[in-house]
Each structure stands twice: as structure tokens, then as C-alpha cells.
Amino acid sequence: MKFSVRKLIPVFVLILASISILRFVRIVITTSSPHPLPALPPHVQHACTSPLSCSKVLTGIAGNSTFTPPAYTTSLTGKEFRLLSNLVKQRRPCNLLIFGLEPQYLSLSSINAGGTTIILEDDPNKFTNYRTEISSSTQIYKVQYNVPAKEAYELLKHARRSSTCAPGAALLRQSKCRLALTGLPQEVYKTKWDLVVVDGPSGSDPEAPGRMGAIYSASILARAGNSTDVMVHDVHRTIERWFSWEFLCEENLVSSKGKFWNFRILGHTDPARFCLSQP
């Protein structure tokens, strides 16, 4: 029996159409979920402008929403954490002070074997969430910040006009500067720090505690040592950027990655002022 080419064309079309339909059905089956996630609340949708911001927002609403965030959330990108961990490796064993408890920071104590790692955190929920991940070589202290982020500009004006805020005016614990954190654990004041990380308090809204005091205090602690690296996270935000330039100084910026700035402070140099550009 002979078949003409014209008669075979409909058969080929039917076969190709059948294959396409089968592939479409397979894609639908493999990508659909029998239990889809509930929609995000409107205020969260507004705040979620990127995967990173969504991670932070979802961490904050855990337990207060029908949406369940991932078990492991992070505030650092991979490149940012590599910058930090490489610096710890270069300086280990070192004295490492961290303002703010994040899951990634808990691994730094193993990198800093033989050194001292202290983390300061004001959120009690984080102690509960990460308790099982805390290494015996890491000390974590509960601290309290009483100054909301909305007071940042007034505090900056105060620091510029008050001699009590000058870097050599007084030891941090006895300082009369309104920016000074004087209620930290004694060990913080007694230790010469090699590396200080500022990633807390949250500073997430005007009423939340801001990082003004943490950045200022880190700058004072750094100048009490010989050579201290101070890393400030979230420098895309106004307060972190303002206060870093003011107290850690542009001329001390040695590297950056993403939203992390790394300043290297040489201690005991020109204690009358913070930056070369200041009068």
C-alpha cells in the first residue's frame, strides 16, 4: 500500500500536537502544589521589594501571621559573609565583637578558634530561636537600646557640638556623650577589639532602636586599640551611612561588599577628632 506525502502531513501534525499537550500536562503537574502558600499580608507585600528585604520582614512577623517563613533566614548575602569571614580568618585568633545576632555570625566563633567572640543582642526571640546553634566558645549578652532611630539627626548635632563626644574625651563607660553605650557588659570595655561588626539593633523603622550609639561606641572602642576593623552593615540606609562617615571616616574605608563597609581604625591617633576632614 502506498501513501502520498500529502496524506502523511495530518498524521505528523497530530503526533506533534499530542507530544506538546503531554509536555504541558507534565509541567503543570510537577510545578503545582497541593497546598499553596497563603498570600502575604498587604503591609508585607509593600515591604518586600527584594528577596533580602522579604527575608527580614518575614523574620519579624514569624508567629504573628499565617505565613510561615523559611526556617533559616539571613541578613547577609553570600559575598558579604565571605568578606567578613575572610577578615576573621586573616586576623584569627582575634577579639571579635558583634552588635546583632544573626545565624551566620554563630559560625564565626569556629573560624575564630582560640579567640574571643562576643555577640550583643536586644531581641529576646533570637536567643530562643538560635539557642541550639550557639557554640560554647561564643558569649552572647542581652543588651538594651533606649534611643529610637527617629532621634538620629538630633544626636548627630549633639555629638558635633559637645566636647564630651570627642574620641579622647573619656573612656566609653564613663562618657557623658548621649551616643555612648555605657550599659554594656564589663568585658566589652576591658577588651582591645580586633574586629567589631555593627549589625544591630534593627533600626527597621523610626520608632525602633537605631544604630547611632552602636556605630559611635564601636568607633570609640576601635580607637582604644592598635588597629581595629569596624564593619557596618546596611549602609544603604541613611543612619548607617551618616554615622559611619561621621565617626569611622571616609579615609579609613578599606573595602566594601554589597551593604557592608569595612573601616580600619588606627588607635591612639589624633584623639581630638574623628576624621581628617573635620575642623
Image (cartoon, rainbow, N blue to C red):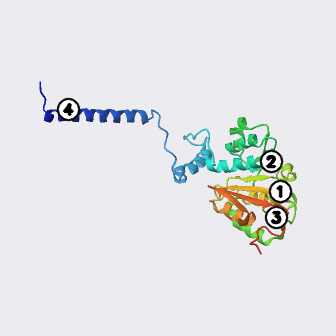
Would you say 2 lies left or right of 117 here?
left
Label 3 Cα neighbours within 10 Å, binned few <14 / some 14-19 / many ≥20: many
State if disc 4 and disc 3 touch (CB < 8 Å). no
Residue 11's disc is 4
Would you say 30 lies left or right of 188 here?
left
Residue placed under numbered mark 3 in the picture: 177
- Amino acid carrying label 2: it is Cys
**Comparing labels 3 and 4, the label whose residue is closer to the camera:** 4
Residue sitting at x 70%, y 43%:
126
Considering only vertical position in the picture, is 217 above or below 41?
below
Q: CA distance from mark 1 to mark 3?
A: 10 Å
- Amino acid carrying label 4: it is Val
* Disc 4, SS: helix
> Which of pointers 1 and 4 lies earlier in the amino acid sequence?
4
Residue placed under numbered mark 2 in the picture: 94
Would you say 173 lies left or right of 4 here?
right
> Which of pointers 1 and 3 lies earlier in the amino acid sequence?
3
* Disc 3, SS: loop
**Comparing labels 1 and 4, the label whose residue is closer to the camera:** 4
Residue 135, percent from left and from top: 76, 37
- Amino acid carrying label 3: it is Cys
Label 4 Cα neighbours within 10 Å, binned few <14 / some 14-19 / many ≥20: few
Label 1 Cα neighbours within 10 Å, binned few <14 / some 14-19 / many ≥20: some
> Which of pointers 1 and 2 lies earlier in the amino acid sequence?
2
Residue placed under numbered mark 1 in the picture: 182
